[in-house]
Amino acid sequence: MKEFELEPGEHVVRETRKHWFLFLKELLPYAIIAVLPFAIPNLLMLVPTLGGYASLFDFSTPLMRLSLGIWLLITWTSAWGAFTQYFLDIWVITNNRLVDIDQKRYFSREVSSLLLSRVQDVTINVHGVIPSLLDIGDINVQSAGASSNEFIMKGIPHPSQIRDLILKYAPTEPKNPGI
């Protein structure tokens, strides 16, 4: 990993991305858009008054082939952008901190980290039937300090395992025997 430097004695415990189901959900609109030029002529034929427009989608002409090629190229490029976003967005848990690597655009990345020693609370949110069945959830990590930041990890697979891992490496407060 070159996005951030490990401190001496620090090691990566786990890396995780959004759940694969959420990635497929993001790709579904691009698949539908890619199929549209092939489906529209058949749909137009179902409506007698619009059937004449189906001949506009004759892909044997050079202009329509060019149009189809541009349509599919734009769709493919957009879908590739969604894949890039999925692949480069990652959360890394080390034995000392939690690191969020967020790919904003193709050439813009934001890396933020939270020391596990500042972790106050870790909350899991799972909403819906499919997330419950596939074990997908959001993790909110509340930190201590003057600014009291919240670190949110959305669409994490097996959120209870990640929460337990964070809590395992977050140091517990020393007990005061005098109280």
Image (spheres, rainbow, N blue to C red):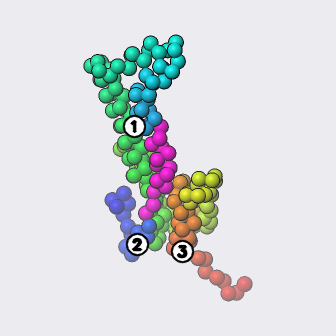
Q: Using the image as rendered, state which of residue 141 and residue 88 is in the foreground.
A: 88
Mark 3 residue element: helix
Look at the numbered discs 3 and 2 and tell me whether their residues touch, using CB distance below 8 Å.
no
Q: Residues within 10 Å of mark 2 (few under 14, many from 20)?
A: few
91 vs 27: above or below: below
What residue is rendered at 43% in x and 63% in y? 15
164 vs 141: above or below: below
**In the rendering, at what x and y percent does residue 158 appear?**
53, 63
Q: Which label is found at residue 10?
A: 2
Q: Earlier in the sequence, mark 2 or mark 1?
A: 2
Q: Earlier in the sequence, mark 1 or mark 3?
A: 1
Q: What stretch of residues is rendered in magenta?
A: 15-29
Tag in front: 3 or 2: 3
Cα–Cα span, label 2 and label 1: 37 Å
What residue is rendered at 48% in x and 24% in y? 43
Q: Residues within 10 Å of mark 3 (few under 14, many from 20)?
A: few
